[in-house]
Image (cartoon, helix red, strand yellow):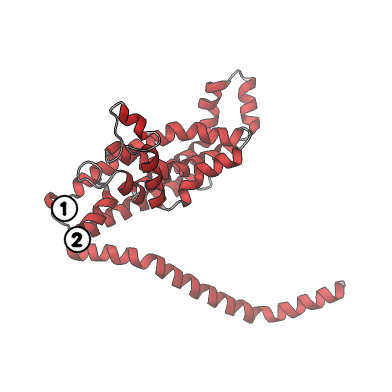
Amino acid sequence: MIPILRKQRKINTSDSPLAAAFGSAISTFIAAAGLIFLSLPLIALILRALQSGFPDLAVSGIPQALLLSFVTTLATAALTLIVGTPIGYLLARREFRFKRLISVLIELPIVLPPAVAGLALLIAYGRRGMVGSLLADIGITIPFTIYAVIMAQTFVAAPFYIRAAQIGFSTVPREIEEAGRVDGASGWTLFRWITIPVTFHALAAGLILSWARALGEFGATILFAGSLQGRTQTMPLLIYNVIERDLNAAIWTGVILIGLAALALFVSSWLTRPRDHG
């Protein structure tokens, strides 16, 4: 058996230079084609924006949509941080019945069609919804308000942070926490001064990606919150509303979103890069 393997290895080795060169050329071509396909639309949009010039802010609606997007996404990030951190910690550190099912339900909005997410929110929290009807009885209406925008953004974006938090908490060495307990730390003190600092970069990166996802949310928002200028019209909704009557404003809104998304990805990548602790 061994001589046969050695003979086969020699045959493969003798053929490898040509095969490797051919495989490398094919791989390079496919990679280049994929890179062009993915980057060309973004480059085209940016070039078109530079050629057309910046639109009139007074009539474009960009300042109002930009302000509303920042307010709602910051509120979404804060809500995600408050709610998502204990959920991530619970999923990472506790074993309980139906844990896998709960984890799937929490992460489902990541792959859920946006229209379905908006419809689900409307059925649950609409005026005639499961919870919305009870709220309507006491005079609280959520749909087509800024609160609906925040809820839609949180629903689709929070799973990104929860997943990052779960991974981050699960990688904390138990020895570090045990050492903290030996020194007298426990409960919140242990979590605040040991667990959080160790997982800070992972949590921050996950929160930034969650914020970026909330910034680009469209489908769930338009179904659950509508697109009312100055009230619920975020930047993605502005693009949808003005693309036919003011293409230049839509293009520049898209460019601004691209810039913010790229910045979020850059910061997230920087936070999660390998670090030399030596």
Q: 246 and 219: which one is in front?
A: 219
Relative horizontal placement of residue 2, taking residue 111 as reference (left or right) = right
* Corner quadrant of residue 211: top left
Estimate the x, y position of residue 187 in percent, counting from the top left.
56, 21
Residue 134 against residue 249 in the figure, above or below? above
Q: What element carries label 2?
A: helix
Q: What residue type is labelled 2?
A: Asn
What residue is rendered at 22% in x and 41% in y?
A: 231
* Quarter holding residue 4: bottom right
Residue occupying the point 58% across, 20% down? 185
What quarter of the picture does the C terminus occupy? Answer: top right
Q: Do the residues labelled 1 and 2 touch (CB within 8 Å)?
A: yes
Q: Which quarter of the figure has residue 178?
A: top right
Residue placed at 30% from the left, 26% from the top? 138
Above or below, 150 against 7 in this view is: above
x, y percent for residue 102: 55, 39
Label 1 is placed on what type of residue?
Ser
